[in-house]
Image (spheres, grey):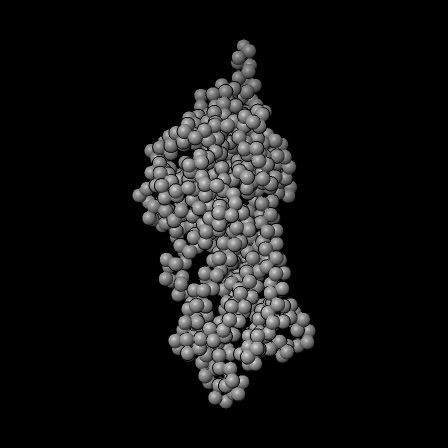
């Protein structure tokens, strides 16, 4: 594991149980500063639970999670101003306009010159024309873009993105990925991305953590994983892991290379 | 985070900005909706009219109402201060449930005490709009001015509002624990104390076993104080201080219940999952 000075996020033996149900089981990983790491796994693999613990929204049953050196959730107020997130599990007030919603969050995050900043992120996230519209009147794709605008409003050092482009068409999805890449290049932000879009993972992520049933089953760069599983894409690697074929594939690949 | 974009996020100024954000989020909702404003004034105004007409009917033959014709109107308006105080705090929280906005709020730098101050600020706004409207109609229709109570009105108003906040915070905790199925409690909770608060009658008429319960409520002391002022023209400091001291206890208990529920929600993982 990386030293915490090099890592923006360090997770050690992190577990979360609800009674007898184990959602996350002794997960350990680190996310290097300024990089993007994907958290992959099927539905119920423990991605959102892990992200919730990193945000301080959920108290771990055991283990530790630190973000920018702060223990979560105990020291969350020290780092929450430097973090932000998007998630399909939350929404914004529907009767407020997009501009009003962003103004509220600009206040919450202590953004200086909020009007200028709102205009800038609205332009970047392609929501400038929606600022006066009630949030509830927007399409799913437009809401996703507004949610992303909210997530970068405070120019965070750590961005946790839970399926950030799930409901976007390919064109807007590509523009959002480009925006996030540029944003990271400009600010050095660390991103942890939970996504079911494997093209997005191959394109944006330096590292990948594969989860199944709350356990880390593999990790490495997308290229390393594709080679290790003897596959052509991350989509195929994901299917191997999700369907429990990972061990057989790795063994098969090893035999082929020995032969 | 660049210093250009983020202002200081610690200290009183930053804290006040976050409270303003909570206030702003609900003020946008309330003030731009005439329907909401009318619905806030509707119940207190209609109730006030019913009691005012009853007073007009009974006053000619009732010496008590002859000497204090504004008695029932004052009581109903002050009761509504308590109701609005509680509802303002609880509904502010319920709105976040419906909007599925709790996750966004509680991963921002907003702290629970700041959120509670924001809830309280909204409650004051709701009480001013709701009861203010009813007070205006009481004057226009029946020439009764709540301000005829003079400076003690402020003491009554504050004591009832603070008690409402205590109950509202406890209800927020209950709703967070039980989910939106407990929403009705936010509307009905306050009425359980109505019979023992001595709103329209003195505590002395209660059965002996209800009196200790009644005297443990700040509302009873406030309404006893209101009666003493209207009927005898004296401000009862003993009732004022009893209500104020009890309010400290109820507000602390309400805040503690809400904080406990919030900690419990972080254990159960409900902050990200709750919604309509």
Residue for point 51% across, 85% down:
B67
In the foreground, B12 or A227: B12
Against B65, is B100 above or below?
above
Q: Residue furthest right?
A: B209
Residue found at x 39% / y 65% = B38
Q: Is residue B159 above or below residue A202?
A: below
Q: Residue furthest left?
A: A129
Check the image and name the residue furthest to the bottom. Answer: B61
At x 46% / y 85%, what residue is drawn?
A: B57
Q: Is residue A170 left or right of residue B100?
A: left
Q: Residue at x 45, y 29 (%)?
A: A188
Residue A121 drawn at (x, y percent): 37, 38
Percent coordinates x, y for residue B120 in the rendering: 51, 57
Quadrant, the N terminus of chain A: top right
Could you tell me if residue B95 is visible in this image? yes
Residue B133 lies left or right of residue B219; in this view the side is left
The quadrant the C terminus of chain A occupies is top right
Image vertical order of residue A31 relative to residue B123, above or below: above
Q: Is residue A88 visible?
A: no
Q: Nearer the viewer, residue A29 or B232?
A: B232
The count of marks equals 0
Give the image location of residue A88, x and y in percent.
46, 42
Which quadrant holds residue A149? top left
* Picture coordinates of residue A61, whole percent (x, y): 63, 39
Q: Tell me if A188 is positioned left or right of B221 in this view.
A: left
The residue closer to the viewer here, A176 or B232, is: B232
């Amino acid at each position: 594991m990386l030293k915490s000075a090099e890592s923006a996020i360090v997770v050690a033996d992190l577990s979360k149980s609800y009674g007898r149900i184990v959602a996350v089981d002794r997960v350990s990983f680190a996310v290097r500063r300024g990089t993007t790491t994907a958290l992959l796994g099927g539905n119920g693999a423990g991605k959102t639970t892990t992200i919730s613990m990193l945000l301080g929204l959920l108290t771990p049953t055991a283990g530790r999670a630190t973000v920018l050196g702060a223990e979560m959730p105990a020291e969350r107020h020290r780092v929450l101003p430097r973090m932000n997130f998007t998630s399909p599990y939350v929404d914004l007030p529907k009767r407020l306009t997009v501009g009003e919603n962003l103004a509220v969050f600009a206040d919450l995050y202590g953004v200086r010159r909020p009007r200028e900043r709102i205009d800038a992120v609205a332009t970047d996230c392609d929501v400038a024309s929606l600022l006066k519209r009630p949030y509830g009147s927007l399409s799913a794709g437009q809401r996703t873009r507004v949610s992303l605008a909210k997530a970068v409003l405070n120019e965070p050092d750590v961005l946790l993105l839970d399926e950030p482009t799930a409901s976007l068409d390919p064109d807007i999805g590509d523009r959002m990925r480009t925006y996030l890449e540029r944003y990271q290049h400009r600010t050095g932000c660390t991103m942890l991305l939970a996504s079911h879009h494997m093209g997005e993972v191959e394109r944006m992520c330096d590292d990948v953590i594969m989860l199944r049933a709350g356990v880390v089953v593999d990790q490495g760069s997308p290229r390393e994983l594709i080679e290790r599983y003897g596959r052509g894409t991350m989509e195929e690697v994901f299917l191997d892991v999700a369907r429990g074929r990972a061990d057989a594939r790795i063994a098969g690949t090893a035999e082929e290379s020995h032969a | 985070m660049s210093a250009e974009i983020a202002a200081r996020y610690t200290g009183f100024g930053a804290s006040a900005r976050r409270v303003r954000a909570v206030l702003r989020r609900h003020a946008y909702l309330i003030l731009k909706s005439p329907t909401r404003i009318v619905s806030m004034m509707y119940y207190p105004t209609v109730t006030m009219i019913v009691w005012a007409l009853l007073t007009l009917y009974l006053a000619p033959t009732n010496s008590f109402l002859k000497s204090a014709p504004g008695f029932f109107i004052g009581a109903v308006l002050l009761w509504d201060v308590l109701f609005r105080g509680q509802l303002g705090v609880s509904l502010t929280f319920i709105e976040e449930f419906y909007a599925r906005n709790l996750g966004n709020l509680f991963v921002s730098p907003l702290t629970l005490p700041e959120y509670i101050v924001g809830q309280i600020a909204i409650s004051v706004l709701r009480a001013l709009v709701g009861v203010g409207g009813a007070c205006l109609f009481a004057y226009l229709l029946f020439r009764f001015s709540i301000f005829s109570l003079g400076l003690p009105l402020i003491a009554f108003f504050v004591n009832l509002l603070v008690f409402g906040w205590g109950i509202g915070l406890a209800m927020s905790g209950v709703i967070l624990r039980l989910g939106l199925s407990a929403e009705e409690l936010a509307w009905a909770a306050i009425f359980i104390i109505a019979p023992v608060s001595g709103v329209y009658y003195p505590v002395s008429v209660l059965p002996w076993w209800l009196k200790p319960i009644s005297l443990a409520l700040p509302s009873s002391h406030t309404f006893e104080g209101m009666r003493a002022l209207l009927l005898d023209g004296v401000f009862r400091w003993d009732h004022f201080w009893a209500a104020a001291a009890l309010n400290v206890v109820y507000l602390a208990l309400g805040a503690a219940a809400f904080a406990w529920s919030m900690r419990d929600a972080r254990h159960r993982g409900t902050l990200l999952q709750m919604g309509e």
